[in-house]
Amino acid sequence: MSEGTLGFSISDLAPDDGKAIGQAARILVEGFRDDWPGAWPNEEEALQEVREALGGDRICRVARGEDGRVIGWVGGISGYEGKVWELHPLVVRSDIRRKGIGRALVSDLEARVRERGALTLWLGTDDVTDMTTLSGTDLYPDVLGHLANIKNLRGHPYEFYSRLGFSLIGAMPHANGWGKPDIYMAKRCR
């Protein structure tokens, strides 16, 4: 491995790989702790999320480092009779972010849903800790006006997804409490 590169591979997470499932759950808790503290506050809730992601109608892919340890994972949930898939969740170990792992996981998920006939991939990305100008305010009555003028104040991931071709398609005001919206994004798969 040369300086600045990180070797990893992406594969399905096997339902009987308890060690990897535990690693994925720990990454989920750690990865959401600071900016989305209520998402998966403990390993028990994160383990439940990972197990749900292993359901027969879902996609669960992990990135593994050269040592075989899970360093990131992405899930996909089918909707609209398979025409639309939700990206849920995406997480990369915090100490190795910004090295292309998240981008690779999203690209891999896109390929998997496209193989299944998807036309659209969407996601929700909450703002519960004042990371954007949508947080801490009442978005009504002009939700789309607020969305059109969104600004990133503290590294909210909507800009990461925008770089990957996702478009802002809406926001659910107060989804996580007053002034804590969910931001919706989507992209074409075909």
Image (cartoon, grey):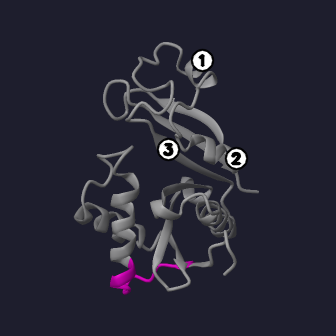
- Percent from the top left, x then y, of residue 170? 56, 32
- Percent from the top left, x then y, of residue 173? 42, 26
Say whether disc 2 or disc 3 marks the residue closer to the N-terminus. 3
Name of the residue lying farthest toward the front: 3
Is residue 9 visible to us here?
yes
Closest to the observer: 151 or 49? Answer: 151
Residue type at mark 3? Gly
Q: Which mark is residue 145?
A: 1
User: Of helix, strand and loop, which one carries label 3?
Assistant: strand
Taking the magenta stretch, the answer to whether it contains residue 16 is yes
Q: Residues within 10 Å of mark 3 (few under 14, many from 20)?
A: many
Is residue 59 visible to us here?
no
Q: Which residues are magenta?
A: 11-20
Q: Residue at x 68, y 70 (%)?
A: 115
Q: Residue at x 50, y 86 (%)?
A: 67
In front: label 2 or label 3: 2
Taking the magenta stretch, the answer to whether it contains residue 127 is no
State yes or no: discs 1 and 2 in contact (Cβ < 8 Å): no
Q: Is residue 81 left or right of residue 54?
A: right
Q: In the rendered image, which residue does mark 3 sit on?
A: 124
Say whether disc 1 or disc 3 marks the residue closer to the N-terminus. 3
Residue type at mark 1? Gly
- Percent from the top left, x then y, of residue 112? 64, 69
